[in-house]
Image (cartoon, rainbow, N blue to C red):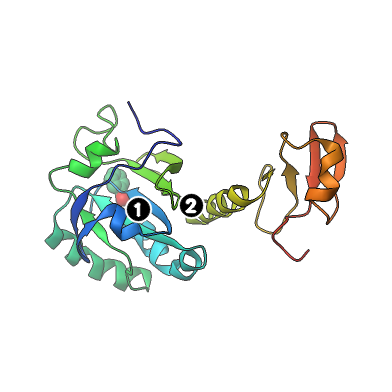
Amino acid sequence: MALQLGDTAPDFTAVTTEGTINFHEWLGNGWGLLFSHPADYTPVCTTELGRTAQLKAEFDKRNVKAIALSVDGLDSHLGWINDINETQNTTVNFPIIADENRAVANLYGMIHPKADNTLTVRSVFVIAPDKTVKLTLTYPASTGRNFMEILRVIDSLQLTADYSVATPVDWKDGEDCVVSPAIATEDIPAKFPKGHRVIKPYLRMTPQPNKDN
Ligand code: BEZ
């Protein structure tokens, strides 16, 4: 069965462009972003890995380590990194797993045979410090992902892990949040002293609790 939210992210040992890693050990106590791409030396993938490198400061700020994967070999990855650096005006600053035997791809269900029998699709897994899977995304080869959206979801995951709120449609860091349905309206003032609005008994809004707003 495909990996589901709340499952423990499978551990593995793999060869990467930054040496052999044990995944859980490498993650340490932080968050992880594991994402696959169909193949090296392909245009969309080149832009995606370039963007991930450019966003390193944003991932660092959120204590997230990124790691990419395709079923190409180490030499291919290393050669392609030069092209990514050159064409995307960046320096690849995260490991790329060389998953030639598809061990990790199979563990994470990254090959969807009806889309392509051999290549990984564009899978995304966000993994929390307790090693549970908090987000899965699957995009086809023809559509590059939006890494700002991935950062946005990570902001929501990190916020809602610490506070009894959820984030509404199109929410961005700093904007008002929904008070969790588990909180009784009479308990809101004590929990959310910045204030709240009751729009409907089930729709209560509050300023983002971990921001000075
Ligand atoms: C790409 O990254 O551009 C790509 C990879 C596989 C199929 C189609 C596009």
Amino acid beneath label 1: Val
Amino acid beneath label 2: Asn
Residue 190: which disc? Answer: none
Q: Quadrant of residue 112?
A: top left
Q: Quadrant of residue 119?
A: top left
**In the rendered image, the vertical position of residue 140 relative to residue 192, given as above or below:** above
Q: Position of residue 90 (x, y in %)?
A: 37, 73
Which residue position is annotated with label 2?
146
Looking at the image, is mark 1 or mark 2 nearer the viewer?
2
Q: Which is more toward the observer, 154 or 72?
A: 154
Q: Residue at x 23, y 44 (%)?
A: 104
Q: Residue at x 69, y 43 (%)?
A: 168
CA distance for labels 1 and 2: 12 Å
Q: Residue at x 68, y 44 (%)?
A: 164
70 on left or right of 151: left
Secondary-structure class at tag 2: loop
Residue 20 appears in the figure: yes
Position of the N terminus by quadrant: top left
Which residue position is annotated with label 1?
44
**In the rendered image, the vertical position of residue 18 relative to residue 190, given as above or below:** below
Would the CB of label 1 be found within 8 Å of ligand 1?
yes
Q: Position of residue 22 (x, y in %)?
A: 23, 55
